[in-house]
Image (cartoon, rainbow, N blue to C red):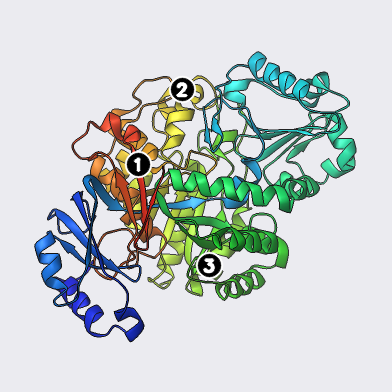
Amino acid sequence: MRRPGSRLLLLIALLAAASSAAAEDAVRIFVARKIITMEPDPREAKAVAVAGGRILAVGDLEEVEASLGVRGAEIDRRFEEKVMLPGFIEPHFHPSLAATILPLDTISAMSWQKPDGATEVVRGRDAFLAALVARDASLPEGRWLIAWGYHRPYHGELSRADLDEISRERPIVIWQRSVHEMFFNSRALDALGYREADFARTEQSDWEKGHVYEAGLFAVAGSMLARLSDPESYARGLAMMSEVIRRGGITTVAEQGFPQINDQLEYSLLTRELAKKPPYRFVLVPNAMFLMRQEETVAAAELAATELLARSTDRIRVVKHVKFYADGAIFSQLMKLRDGYLDGHHGEWMMPPAVQEEVLGTFWDRGWSLHIHVNGDAALDLLLDMIERKRKEGARDDVRIVLEHYGYAREDQHARVKALGIAVSNNSYYLHELAPPYAREGMGPERARDISPLGGLVRAGVRFSLHSDYPMAPALPLTLAWVAANRIASDGEVWAPDQKVSVDLALRAITIESAWSLGLEEEIGSIAPGKRADFTILEEDPYTQPASRLKDIPIWGTVFEGEPHPLD
């Protein structure tokens, strides 16, 4: 937090020390009905001056004009009846997955807004198989049928035999909702050259069902992942991704775990997409699990992550943060739960605990902030023990630790998270989609009600941000805030009202708290002098609307580095 008066000092420094090139930048003052700054000072503002992509001053129009002295400014009143917030930040997103999934067929239990329109809701095993049959009938001969969105709690069991009944001639691949699993029909297995011996290399596979999951996906399905990342299709998917980001009112997007599949392809095509100058920037967080597969040792992975820092540019920032993985996907019910699942199955580790601890220690000791994928309370217990041991060793205290997802945790764990100085980046959408089916199977109602337990974190004093983990949730920050503030699930019911958070905390979670989680709170996340001139423009004031309307507030568009970008 800045000291009192530092905003004025920064403004004076900006105006006095500007280079001749910067001094020539035109100054524009945007006037709005209301500017929500997300700064500690709650004073309401109605004008913001920008130049060279940065904020010069914010406040009433008169004081903003006065602060500029003799320097002239254009007054832009297009937002005079609108509400301005800091540009929304998506701190956990996967461009590689967006680029591969968006061009595919979507057959899912939830409706998805894609650039070409909303998808249909498909629920029930019969309806899911019927949708595949219809899609098979519509495709030309020789075309693969590849569909994303299958989710067992909504669609029932699935196997190779089911897919063979649809077609033995056409290769069929079903990518599960969490992207941590795939199902193949026999024709697809033959076309890819997969054999039973390939599946035998990992326990996280089932040859008879044509099913691979978690680490087995990378051990077995590498050629399929390569097929999905075909450069032409991938580039088309990135263009669709840019439209998704734009329509969410997002101005900064972070890839949590770069790369996912192919570092050269992902970086080069992302660079090409950003060369089109869409109104957002990317932040890359290196992926320890990928780098370890590539380099084989943790020490070598850390060196490779350090080399990634040299790729940082203004539009693609690589930060000294690293991501690693604990347990499996919540969408697959493969997270590690202390009391297990109702049917007796167990979750899975994405990285063995001993490896997790080595990654934690190596990167921590070398000054990397840590983002840790964790979903279940048993995995969280293990991680908190690891972190506590490091704290007792006297580990450096300049490292930020952010728990990513935090799907299910107990009340006692929130207190430990606070005591250990850890933050959380939560996917609130888990509650919306998963609570009703998981109450019936897998977790039971008592645990399902506390999926995404944000109220507990607030009571414990833990800072939190919100993310979509796109495509795990829609890239719609206002929808994430709506779930957090209302706890309304897919059945229309309110689940665990005690886990609700205020509208203010929900909005902070998609702005300044998301910036903090990435170590960028001095650049983005609030509207203050010296920061990037990134704003999200709303048609209505979220503080004066009922919390139930948050997701329905129309977005006019964004201002990115001082330039307006309307949606229409």
Q: Which of marks 1 and 3 is in front?
A: 1
Q: What residue type is disc 3 on? A: Gly
- Residue 226, compared with residue 497, is above or below; it is below
Residue under numbered circle 1:
555
- Residue 473, compared with residue 460, is above or below; it is above
Mark number, residue 436: 2
Residue under numbered circle 3:
361
Q: Give the x, y percent position of residue 271.
A: 59, 63
**Mark 1 in CB contact with mark 2 (< 8 angstroms):** no
Quadrant in which the N terminus is drawn: bottom left
In the foreground, 246 or 308: 246
Quadrant in which the C terminus is drawn: top left
Rendered image quadrant of residue 520? bottom left
At horizontal 45% and vertical 27% (from top left) the residue drawn is 435
Mark closest to the chain's N terminus, 3 or 2: 3
Q: What residue type is disc 1 on? A: Ile
